[in-house]
Image (cartoon, rainbow, N blue to C red):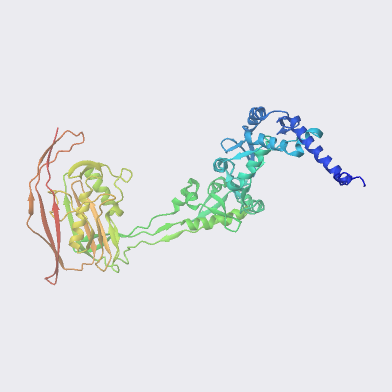
Amino acid sequence: MRPRTALVPRITSLPPVALAGGALAVGVGGLYLAGLLLTGGQIDSGTTVRGVDIGGLSRAEAVRKLERELGAAGARDLPVKAGERTGRVDPERAGLSYDIGETVDRAARTGADPVSVFGGFFRSGGDVEPVVHLDEDKARAALGQLAKGLDQKVRDGGVAFDDGRVKAITPRTGYALDVDAAVRPLRDSFLRGDTRTAAPLPTRETRPEVIAGEVERAVRTFAEPAMSGPVTLTAAGRPFTVGQDVLGEHLTMRPDGSGELRPKLDVKGLRAEPSVAGPLDEVTTTAANAKLKPEGDKAVVAEDATVGRSVTDKALGKAVLPLLTASGAARSGEVEVRETRPEVTRENAAELGLTEKMSSFTVHFEPAEYRTKNIGRAVELINGSVVMPDETWSFNRAVGERTEANGFMDGIIILDDKFTKASGGGVSSVATTVYNALFFAGLKPVEHGAHSFYIERYPEGREATVAWGSLDLRFANDSGNAVYIQAESTDTSVTVSFLGTRKYDEIKSVTGPRTEVKKPEKQVSDDKECVPQTPLEGFDVTVERVFYNDGREVKREPYRTHYTPRDEIVCE
């Protein structure tokens, strides 16, 4: 019998490569574990953040070191540039800061990478970029504030004149900081940490319309010739000289919209210069209408008209500008002097219908210095007024504001139902006289108002007052012919006559009874400006204007007036 053989498991042979791979896996794992043990949780040696070495430190140590050194660097202002201007930005105000914790974590994550762990055996760590936190709203706000100082307005080239000399103005490009587009470059500048070089920020650029070449042309062809010497002008045979310093005061060169500079002369300013105004005033005169006066029922010429002479601003400018680019004797020229014709002359008075007295009215008053002066001044300004057919005449326009500069003084007026002192007191006597003259001339009242309470020297319901800026006396000339206003005054009276052509044979006034009569009250005043006042009842009254032709009534016009009581005022 053959002996039994024991069964032994067969072991399959592994290829040499497989054996080598297994050995390598065991080796790598061992090396990784060894690397972790070697680093012990510390940041790789040689690791830096913006030049700050944190290699070999624990996380907490790295955070403290970066807060101390990197934090200080991040607080420094950042220099920036927009166009040609520079400024500085406070990172904190702009919402820029380093996230120290995240930066250290980034460095630690890099060290925990298997490749970096193995690097613990073969190499040191590198530079790690810091993590930047940006608050974009704060950044935009800071940049918007910065733009106020960095933005540069565009400046066109130009030419100025100073004391007879030419001054060229250099053109300049305009820059406006693009706030939205500047946020990212500002962050990048903070990230780089370069506080020595100004970081350029994006801008919107505006080019000047008038460039340097146009300035050079304008100086050469106009400005320098204009200031090369004085000009000589002649007006009505009278020569006078205007120096280049005076010319330069009123001469400019302005862009014409196409990039070219054109000369502009301020003729009104030049006209006011003594060297110009004096000679021109001597040769200019105002035309004066023929003076009329009533003679019986007729209107006659009392004084002939005079022709005036005038120099318009346009004529002065037309004479001066061509001379500025001339030289020598060619810098002389003539200023046109025009004749101005009067409206009313001895020859055309009848043609205008100024042939008869239409009406005349006189108001008497107690003498007082302020009345004499103010009434006389108003009469002077009204006398000789000519109102053409369909024109409207205005008392305030003819007389002007009642100021000292216009020839008036303080006097007594009615204000808030009381007598008080103000400039122009007494002028209402002239207004009332004019109103009655137009009333009986049959002309159409356009605006008028009575005094608030009745004044005995005036016809009740047929009087007028005026106030600058609030109440005027106006009438329309609906007579069909011209109307001439003659006014004259004495120390105790004022008379106004309307000369023209009567539209009606006769005009009468019918005054109705007083109604709504009210008694006055008594007041006692200790006001320093108090003016005593006698009492008078208030009432309503209607006055009718009745028109007649050929002895028959043509029409009636009622005018109703309300008067408040005039309270008695006792001054203490």
Q: Position of residue 545 (x, y in %)?
A: 14, 63
Taking the view exactly as shown, the residue that stands out farthest to the right is 2
* Residue 92, above or below 537: above
Direction from residue 460 to residue 274 in the image, left or right: right
* Residue 116, above or below 168: above
Picture quadrant of residue 51:
top right
Q: Which residue is depicted at the point 56% across and 52% down?
A: 232
Q: Position of residue 60 (x, y in %)?
A: 65, 28
Direction from residue 429 to residue 164 in the image, left or right: right
* Residue 514, above or below 344: above
Viewer-closest of 497 and 307:
497
Q: Position of residue 505 (x, y in %)?
A: 16, 68
Location of the C terminus by quadrant is top left
Viewer-closest of 126 and 427:
126
Q: Position of residue 246 (x, y in %)?
A: 54, 46
Q: Which residue is depicted at the point 68% across and 28% down?
A: 58
Viewer-closest of 156 and 317:
156
Direction from residue 88 to residue 373 in the image, left or right: left
Q: How many marks?
A: 0
The answer to whether any part of residue 302 appears in the image is no
The answer to whether any part of residue 108 appears in the image is yes
Taking the view exactly as shown, the residue that stands out farthest to the front is 1
Viewer-closest of 428 and 126:
126
